[in-house]
Image (cartoon, grey):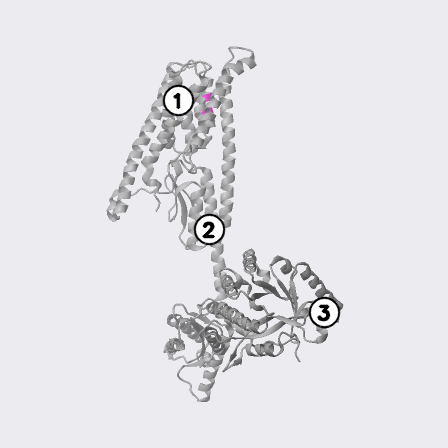
């Protein structure tokens, strides 16, 4: 609501009780404000009239001094200082310093009237409103009378000059600020909660001291310095002193104005950066907030009318056809808006308008790029993005389905009725799809006569089938094209997905396959009437269900591969690797198992089972071979964080104090390591958990991972020893071994498959290795049997 607008008191009857109360208080405040303002205006007129009469009846010896005072007050007017925490309010001027110069042949009260004339002229220029200028001059005149009254009643003399001026200055600002406080209280209903009348004692004190010292310096210069410089005790250069004081104030005012301009420019630049990041309602809100701050306004709104009265405004386009205006009303402190305020508001409105215009054009281009021009439905590219989003962002147990629809015999319809009729049929089909699809479903035209619907928020296959039948029945209703009735016949395929897919494109393939099967079967049977839906047994969904059930029922198994000490020829650790064999599908590869667990949101649960089962198995191994005290498991980098599995890993390792748990992190993933993840890794190390850097030396390995991430074990990828006849590979392994020895890392070389490779590793100084030569990953039972038969021997016959 724009609080600057006048409201008819009769409108209060239509408002709630609280609203009527606000209106009544505002009406009363308006009346009191008018009375206070009128009193100030009358006082200003009376003071000026008294001065004019006094000057006419008893002309001064120096009209130059009188005119200089008036001109100097005008020059001093821009010098205003903020003495409160609120921006722009309250402000006090320093023109009072000009009242400190004595006028021997003129009454002090006449001097105040002359000074008030300058105030009125200055404020007319600044506020551009004569009544506002007179109101301000009236309050200034009252404050000036307090100043000269103190100067009149205090004793004269050089030693009394400073305390006399200090008391007079305090009196001036006390009266002025009390008047401003009264005005604030009278206007309180308009202020809202945005600001309060408050003073900064330190700011007020600095202003009082500065004005007192300036007034003292002026008097000293006038009484002593000028006669000394002129070498004439009777020399009088008072107009010069007044002009010098005014010029100094004007210079300081200009400096303050430059600071204000710099602030405004910085704020406008910030707005030019911020506003393009917003759109719609948020753009309008950001524009109002920025404008309110920059022009120090109590109220800023976007209205359908131009500025009225003391308001300022600028045209703004934020969408739609109607011309609107950015309107600022009631400046903080009750002052008038300046030309700089108008320019800043116009600039903000222009930036916001350009932002809205560009956003509109971008949205229009994006709409054309993602829409089918004939039906207005999203096109194939938009469908692909929507399908990916529906698949990726759905909750774990929320199902989706894809309905692939083909309009049968569309070419024959085009041939019989013409292409214009064919276009009408497609538009009618599209409109029916819009009406019958659910609110969260996505409808798209993906080909000439092919449409798809992404059905979301499903629980069961039966629910998906029911929705598909409803849509197909609606499409098959009769329609009238160019005066002729026909019943569309469609073939549709439905693919249902109960869990998040690794590749959502498989849904499209299966639904398309089911649709073609329906079309083929109807054609083979000679059926040309009646639409139908074919159901696909989506293979990916079936595999996802099997993996999810295996994880939820803790059916995963582990295989164990030995890690050996080449020096002693003994096993000192095992790596635990996840395995699963489904009775229906057979073995599911570990990469597929892990990727499906990720897509289903079950990766953390899978890892928990692996860690628990690996530690329990390691306890059994240690009972048979006490020298085996370490078990390693693979984790994703993000899983070590405190938000995910960090606390669980520490707790699980703590439950087996006689074992060392080693977590292997893939070297490629460390590129996304943050400082927080590094701290999480250090916390795990502090809890006694060993960290291994796995697969180092693969195609995209970097040296930075060796020095930037905390670790205890460096595992060398088998690609680095693929050809040990190459001297360069041997030197790399040798260098990495030296690096590990110097930093007290344990280096394990993976991929050892022959006795010859073992000998080369020994020659290069490698201490630990892992590979098929020492044993393939085998089940817990076979690993236990090996330890019972052969102990910790690295190589068995």
Range of residues picked out in magenta: 68-73
Of pointers 3 and 1, the one earlier in the residue sequence: 1
**Quadrant location of the C terminus?**
bottom right
Q: Which residue is rendered at x = 37% and y = 19% of the image?
A: 149
Q: Is residue 310 left or right of residue 654?
A: left
Q: CA distance from mark 2 to mark 3?
A: 74 Å
* Tag 2 secondary structure: helix
Depth order, front residue of 404/618: 618
Calculate the distance from the C-alpha at mark 3 to the C-alpha at mark 1: 100 Å
Residue 137 in view (yes/no): no
Circles 2, 3 touching at the beta carbon (< 8 Å): no
- The quadrant in which residue 682 appears is bottom right
In front of the other: 750 or 632: 632
Asked whether, in this view, residue 669 is left or right of residue 136, the answer is right
Camera-side mark, 2 or 3: 3
Residue 375 vertical position relative to residue 345 in the rendered view, above or below: below
Report which residue position mark 2 lands on. 353
Mostly what secondary structure, the magenta segment? Answer: helix
Considering only vertical position in the picture, is 491 above or below 312? below
Viewer-side label of 3, 1: 3
Query: Can you give x and y, in whole percent of width and height, for residue 488 in the image?
Result: 40, 79
Residue 449 drawn in magenta: no
Viewer-side residue, 547 vs 26: 547
For mark 1, what is the residue?
147
Q: Residue at x 49, y 31 (%)?
A: 253
Residue 504 position, x and y percent, is: 50, 72
Say which label, 2 or 3, has the lower sequence index.
2
């Amino acid at each position: 609501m724009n609080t600057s607008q006048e409201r008819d008191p009769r409108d209060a009857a239509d408002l709630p009780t609280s609203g009527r109360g606000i209106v009544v208080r505002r009406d009363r405040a308006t009346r009191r404000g008018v009375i206070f303002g009128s009193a100030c205006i009358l006082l200003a007129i009376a003071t000026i009239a008294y001065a004019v009469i006094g000057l006419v009846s008893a002309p001064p010896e120096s009209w130059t001094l009188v005119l200089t005072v008036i001109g100097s007050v005008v020059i001093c007017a821009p010098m205003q200082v903020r003495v409160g925490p609120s921006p722009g309010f309250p402000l006090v001027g320093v023109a009072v310093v000009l009242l400190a110069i004595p006028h021997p042949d003129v009454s002090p009260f006449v001097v105040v009237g002359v000074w008030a004339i300058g105030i009125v002229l200055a404020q007319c220029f600044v506020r551009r409103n004569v009544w506002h200028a007179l109101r301000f001059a009236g309050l200034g005149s009252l404050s000036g009378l307090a100043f000269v009254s103190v100067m009149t009643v205090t004793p004269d003399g050089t030693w009394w000059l400073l305390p006399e001026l200090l008391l007079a200055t305090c009196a001036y600002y006390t009266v002025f600020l009390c008047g401003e406080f009264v005005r604030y209280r009278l206007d309180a209903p308009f202020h809202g909660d945005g600001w309060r009348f408050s003073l900064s004692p330190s700011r007020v004190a600095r202003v009082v001291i500065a004005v007192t010292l300036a007034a003292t310096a002026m008097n000293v210069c006038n009484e002593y310095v000028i006669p000394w410089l002129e070498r004439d005790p009777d020399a009088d250069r008072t107009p010069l002193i007044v002009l010098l004081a005014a010029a100094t104030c004007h210079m300081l005012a200009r400096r303050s104005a430059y600071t204000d301009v710099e602030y405004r420019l910085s704020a406008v630049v910030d707005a030019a950066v911020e506003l393009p990041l917003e759109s719609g309602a948020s753009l309008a809100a950001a524009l109002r907030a920025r404008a309110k701050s920059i022009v120090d306004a109590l109220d800023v709104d976007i209205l359908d009318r131009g500025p009225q009265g003391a308001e300022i405004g600028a045209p703004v386009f934020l969408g739609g056809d109607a011309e609107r205006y950015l309107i600022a009303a009631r400046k903080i402190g009750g002052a008038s808006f300046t030309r700089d305020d108008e320019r800043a508001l116009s600039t903000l409105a222009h930036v916001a308008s350009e932002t809205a215009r560009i956003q509109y054009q971008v949205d229009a281009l994006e709409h054309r790029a993602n829409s089918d021009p004939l039906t207005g439905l999203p096109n194939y590219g938009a469908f692909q993005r929507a399908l990916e989003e529906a698949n990726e962002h759905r909750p774990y147990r929320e199902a989706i389905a894809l309905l692939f629809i083909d309009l049968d015999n569309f070419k024959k319809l085009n041939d019989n009725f013409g292409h214009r009729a064919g276009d009408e049929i497609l538009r009618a089909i599209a409109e029916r799809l819009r009406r019958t699809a659910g609110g969260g479903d996505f409808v798209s035209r993906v080909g000439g006569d092919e449409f798809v619907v992404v059905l979301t928020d499903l629980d069961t296959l039966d629910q998906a089938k029911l929705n598909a039948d409803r849509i197909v029945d609606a499409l098959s209703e009769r329609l009238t094209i160019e005066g002729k009735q026909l019943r569309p016949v469609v073939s549709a395929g439905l693919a249902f997905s109960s869990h998040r897919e690794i590749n959502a494109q498989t849904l499209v393939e299966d639904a398309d396959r089911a649709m073609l099967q329906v079309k083929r079967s109807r054609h083979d049977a000679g059926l040309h009437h009646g639409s139908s839906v074919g159901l696909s047994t989506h293979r990916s969904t079936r595999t996802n269900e099997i993996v999810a059930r295996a994880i939820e029922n803790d059916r995963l198994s582990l295989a164990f591969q030995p890690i050996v000490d080449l020096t002693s020829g003994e096993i000192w650790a095992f790596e635990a690797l996840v395995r699963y064999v489904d009775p229906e599908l057979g073995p599911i590869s570990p990469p597929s198992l892990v990727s499906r667990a990720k897509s289903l949101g079950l990766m953390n649960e899978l890892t928990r089972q692996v860690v628990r089962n690996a530690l329990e198995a390691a306890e059994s191994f240690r009972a048979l071979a006490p020298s085996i005290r370490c078990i390693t498991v693979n984790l994703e980098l993000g899983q070590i964080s405190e938000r995910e599995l960090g606390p669980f890993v520490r707790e699980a390792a703590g439950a087996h104090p006689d074992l060392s748990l080693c977590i292997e992190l893939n070297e490629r993933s460390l590129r996304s390591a943050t400082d927080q993840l590094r701290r999480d890794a250090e916390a795990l190390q502090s809890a006694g958990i060993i960290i291994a850097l796995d697969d180092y030396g693969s195609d995209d390995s970097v040296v930075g991972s060796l020095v930037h991430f905390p670790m205890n074990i460096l595992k060398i990828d088998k690609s680095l020893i693929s050809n040990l006849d190459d001297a360069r590979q041997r030197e790399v392994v040798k260098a990495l071994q030296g690096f590990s020895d110097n930093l007290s890392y344990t280096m394990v070389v993976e991929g050892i498959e022959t006795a010859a490779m073992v000998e080369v590793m020994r020659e290069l100084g490698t201490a630990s290795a892992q590979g098929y030569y020492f044993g393939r990953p085998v089940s817990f039972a076979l690993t236990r049997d090996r330890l019972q038969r052969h102990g910790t021997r690295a190589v068995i016959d």
